[in-house]
Amino acid sequence: MPNPIVSIIVPTYQSQRTLPRMIESIRNQTIPDWELIIIDGSSNDGTTELVTEHQRELGEKLIYIEQVNQGCCVARNTGIDAANGQFIAFLDSDDEFLPNKLQRQLDLFKKRPDLGLVYSDCCYIDTQNQYHPSVFDTHAPVAREVPTETAGQNLHLCPPNLFDYLIQQYFIATIVGMVRRDVLADIRFITDNPHGFSEWIFYLDIVKQHRAGFVNEPLSLHHHTDGSITRTSKLRNAQSHRDLLKTIRKRYPHLSANARNALNQQSATANAQLAYHHYKNADYSAATKYFTESLTHQFNASIATATLKSTTATLLNQHNNKCSVTPCG
């Protein structure tokens, strides 16, 4: 088969229940010139047999790679290395592309072949099975603040400083982006933040170096999943977010004032969330640590008061512990 226009990379792990729906959404694309690369980290769950069945129909259009499960980011990097397309799109095994997803993003690339990335809006179904037509309208206000230049019907060019907007909020989700393949010569997903948000850096790396465009239409359908860590563990999310913000500071040392302010606000919030969690659980020493770190990023009077309370509680605990060993006179 000649090299396809688009390679679609899908990591999967024990997702045999949703894989048929995902594959069907690719088969329903309005353009036929694609390849689907599935990277499977499962073991003995029936995924191999399911994909093999689809391979009989799709032939070389479906590439199946099995590897030890190391998370989505490692799997996506494997897919990038195996891709033959001029452009690369990403999809998760429990989500879907709408039928014109590939076509609409290629429409903008054809108008502006210099773009490195074209992203779009996304619709979603929540855990109560309610349909929402726009992630940007419900969850990503910063995405609507990006000034754009019209290039066609619902096709827009983003400004050169898109990085300064994206660093304020992770609004380019993995599945909404299409990337020119040569842009990824030296860009990959980071793999040392396994609990989320790593995809944010992937797109930050791209828009730091390349212009981007935007299709103002929902082109993907995301299914919220009950029990997902990203939906059930606020503490883990806050910790991952805090750790990733530290990585971002080291990765991009020369930031604009707006970008630095955005990072400071997010770091202050993430540390405050961690601090309040530990304070609620009477771990006053950890609470003091995170409250103090929050204040180093952004002063807040209520956080300063909470820091004083947790510091006092820490000292009181230390005193009581000392007296339990050696009676205090």
Image (tube, rainbow, N blue to C red):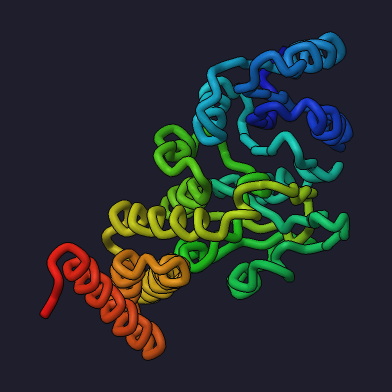
Question: Residue 154 location in percent, x, y?
Answer: 77, 62
Q: Would you place residue 101 above or below residue 24 in this image?
A: below
164 on left or right of 287: right
294 or 254: nearer the viewer:
294
Q: Position of residue 81 (x, y in %)?
A: 51, 23
Between residues 249 and 210, which one lies in front from this camera angle? Answer: 249
Up/down of 103 relative to 5, above or below: below
Relative to 53, is 178 above or below? below
Q: Is residue 249 visible?
A: yes
Asked whether, in this view, residue 191 is left or right of residue 82, the answer is: left
Could you tell me which quadrant the C terminus lies in?
A: bottom left
Tell me, yes or no, if residue 160 can be seen here: no
- In the drawing, does residue 104 fall left or right of residue 5? right
Figure quadrant of residue 127: bottom right
Report x, y in % for residue 242. Answer: 40, 59
Say which of 110 and 46 sits in front.
46
Specify the quadrant that holds the N terminus. Answer: top right
In the rendered view, tell whether residue 56 sits above or below residue 223. Answer: above
Residue plotted at (51% across, 63% down): 166
Relative to 140, 224 lies left or right: right
Q: Residue at x 62, y 35 (%)?
A: 88
Q: Position of residue 264 (x, y in %)?
A: 37, 72
Residue at 46% across, 50% down:
201
**In the rendered image, which quarter is residue 293 located in?**
bottom left
Kindly indicate the quadrant of the structure image that contains residue 35.
top right
Nearest the viewer among 268 and 83 is 268
Q: In percent of the image, x 27 and y 59: which residue is there? A: 253
